[in-house]
Amino acid sequence: MVETLTGTNRSRGLSYQELLKTDSKSVPASLKKESALDHTPLSIDVERYYSREFHDLEVEKLWRRVWQLACHEDEIPEVGDALVYDIASLSFVVVKTGEDEFSAYPNACRHRGRRLLDCPKKGLTNFRCPFHGWSWKLDGTLKEVPCHWDFPNVTEETHSLPKVKTGRWGGFVFINPDPDAQPLKEFLGDIDEHWTTLPFERRYKAVHVAKKLPCNWKIAQEAFMESYHVIATHPTLLYEMGDANSQYDAFGVLSRAISAQGIASPHIEAELAGEPFDDTTPFTVYRHPITGDLYERLSEGRIRLTKADGRVGVFNAQAEPLEGELKNADPHICNWFAGRLTPDMEAASHAFGALPVVEARARRAAAKREQLRPLMGDEIDGVCDAELVDSIYYSIFPNISPWGCYNPIFYRFRPDGDNPEQCIHEIMFMLPVPKGQDRPKPASIHWLGLNDDYMEAPELGSLAKVFNQDNLNLPAVQLGLRSVPGGKIMLAEYQEAKIRHFQATLDDWLDQ
């Protein structure tokens, strides 16, 4: 059985702060930091995930007024390089205008509204509307109007491109359409204290995948804000992740969740924690640590389930029965084991799963140090185990999630155009720039459509399998919300604190 009531306000086992005391290295102050969390809100109106009115309110009160990440500096490295940043129904042009200067403008001609740019451009000397030829200098000044005599009221003062506020952090370019917005530095607050070991200025964009999802952007983002879903959605992680003992914090516009690795979930009885690691691999054979069910991959699209009582059934990757007396199986496990695998996945092993917690974490960290040594040199020797192995995932309001320390994952979530029930999930890997080398060129975006499998992006590695499990839930959440009794969903007081912080911050913006 899963862990339920413990008689306390937390799960059994070590807290994250207690685990940090066993680290083999000095732990940075940011990881030792904890925040007080309030308990508001505990319920959410479901309409905010599909209502056209709420979507329009977000456009006016949020996206037209908040600081938001538009691009990375490396994507427009030379003067005249420009790209398009779209958010909901809004579109902006971001351009490099000087050696160390970036500008942004609404992506619309001042004449008849045609988009000035439809795609990224290199080496522009001006913006010229493809419709009638009106043009502007890179600094936004009106340059030329064909048959200007026919527009006597159009002048440089009246029809130059209005500048959109820009700011920079960590090598990223942010924009804010609100001319009265506070500076980006004030908005972000003390954010830099959380990235002292490997600041983003020392990283480059090695991977960029963007997948369209049939759900509201908040549904997608919130699915990655907590570890509470691990027990049902990612059961294969239970042997090596302290999901229900994660630590949650909120600091201004920043929130954080930390899930320890190399320690079994408190949902698992201690005697079972090492059981599956003797003769199995992460993608071929799996015994569920709570039910005892044994899942064995037979081939792509076929998985055999053997229950504790000896009953057997064969299922496909969608958990549909193919053979045998069993008619039901865990859809997330079937997706994981019967779905597509790469050769590396088939050869993977549980290298440290059966070891005691402290030793397992230390050995994981040591292996990670050697993996990063070619990039970081001996500097890596001073990095603590927690920074190398744990899942430390931040969210910066409103829609980006950079992971902490040496984890390269960086998410962005956006509405897909003007559709409140569709969004874009972006995954970037921000890797260290190799020591003593020039910055590698940034990866181009690899687009995946609504019906594409995350495995279509092999650059994601085994994370594609994890995302596929999440994606089993997201469309079903979007559909199910309309049937929620009373029209409200509920949130946990602690384990869903990041979602509550996000929703409370969103309410503050929409109420202004």
Image (cartoon, grey):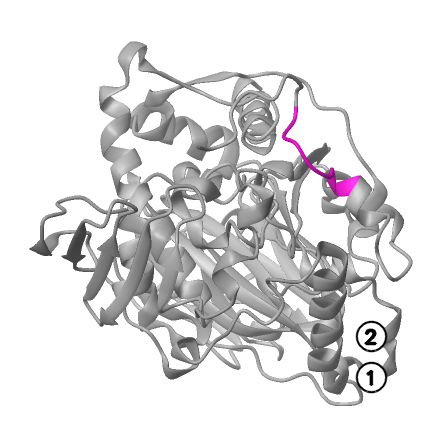
Q: Which residue is drawn at 77% across and 63% down?
A: 199
Name which quarter of the figure residue 102 lies in.
bottom right
Q: Distance between the residues labelled 1 and 2?
A: 6 Å
Secondary structure at badge 2 equals helix
Residue 192 visible in this rendered orientation of the protein: yes
Residue 235 to residue 262: above or below: above
The residue furthest right is 26
Residue 186 belongs to the span the image colors magenta: no
Name which quarter of the figure residue 25 lies in.
bottom right
Amino acid type assigned to the residue bearing label 2 in the image: Ile
Residue 11 belongs to the span the image colors magenta: yes
How would you classify the magenta stretch by its main secondary structure?
Answer: loop
Residue situated in front as seen by the camera: 120 or 394: 394
Q: What stretch is highlighted in magenta?
A: 10-17
Residue situated in front as seen by the camera: 202 or 102: 202
> Crowdedness of circle 2 by 10 Å Cα count: few (<14), some, many (20+)?
some
Left or right of residue 356: residue 123: left
**Which numbered tag is attached to residue 380?**
2
